Amino acid sequence: MYSLVKKYVNKTDDGLNHLLGFLMSKDAAVYLVSLTVVFLIAGSTVFDRVLREDAYNFIVTGMRIAHGDFGSFQKQSIGWPLFLGGVFWLTQVETVFGAMRIARWVTILLTAISVIPLAYICRHALPKRQYAAGCLSVLIVFASAPLIHFIGKNGMSEPLFMLLVMSAVLVFLSGSNASRNGVVAALLLGLAYWVRPNSLFVFIALIASIGLQCLFANTYRARDIIVATLVFVAVCLPYWFARYMEFGSAFDYGPNSKYFVDNYEQVWADNIENPSLLTYLTTHSWSEIYQKFIERGMLQV
């Protein structure tokens, strides 16, 4: 009896694996999940609700760009407003409320499209036998995650940033021409830096990965690190120069640059200045530094 049950379970398991393998090999499941993300997020989005704060500022800046006004901007990253400006120019939107609806749809579609590079990353990262079930599980978790739904419907920069970073990771993992892959990944991360400066940390991880493969796998050479760095800098350089000319610093992002204040409320307090690294180190104990950057920082990520 036990052997019959075990045989039945094994056959069922093999049948499911064959079915999932067929779906994933044809990419049908990937596009189905992507389409599902559109319906799930759009179905829970109140398109008539007014976007506020950062999302509103992004949209207003995008509308200015769409009308050819590239004048003084706030200290936010300019990549997302530039992207929105192109969309608004193509759609010829004239009202801020119409722009809000379009911005919501753009972020919903970008979030859904992100499913595709995520699936191919799974294809490179997972063993072939576990790829179908593992990849489908990852896509379902992604499609149902509340955070993904939140960023997908609020007209913010995260979906575009997520798509660019995922594309960079996919390019880095795929293909036989490692040197070219490193260059293209660096280019995509440079574009992602225009959207959100967090891309710098992903680029550091990219360079570290290339360095490790130089040492242990001989997939890359030392010059690939230099070339990738030059590509990243070349893409970011016009942005850094524009920010320097506008704000007097390429890396000043206003309140978001207050890395060394003690709590979140002080980030947005106009009467609280951002202390320098030296000031922070001389006025805080090692225990406080550990709690801020390790215990409540890295360990919370």
Image: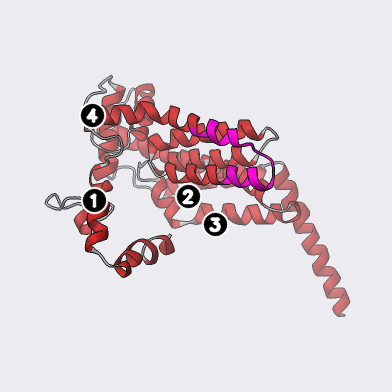
Colour scheme: secondary structure
24 left or right, relative to 227: right
Q: Whole-Å distance between the Cαs marked 3 and 2? A: 13 Å
> x, y percentage for residue 119?
61, 46
Q: Which residue is mark 4?
A: 246
The disc, 3 or 1, on the residue closer to the chain's N-terminal end is 3
List the residue tagged with mark 1.
Answer: 276
Q: Amino acid at mark 4?
A: Glu
Front disc: 4 or 3: 4
Going 30% across and 32% down the picture, which residue do you hit?
98
Q: Judge from the rendering whether residue 83 lies leftward or rightward of residue 129; answer left or right.
A: left
Q: Is residue 33 magenta?
A: no
Q: Which residue is mark 3?
A: 141
In the rendered structure, the answer to whether residue 12 lies left or right of residue 95 reads right
Say which element carries label 3: helix
Above or below 116: residue 7: below
Residue at the spot of label 2: 40
Q: Residue at x 79, y 63 (%)?
A: 12
Quick one: SS at disc 4?
helix
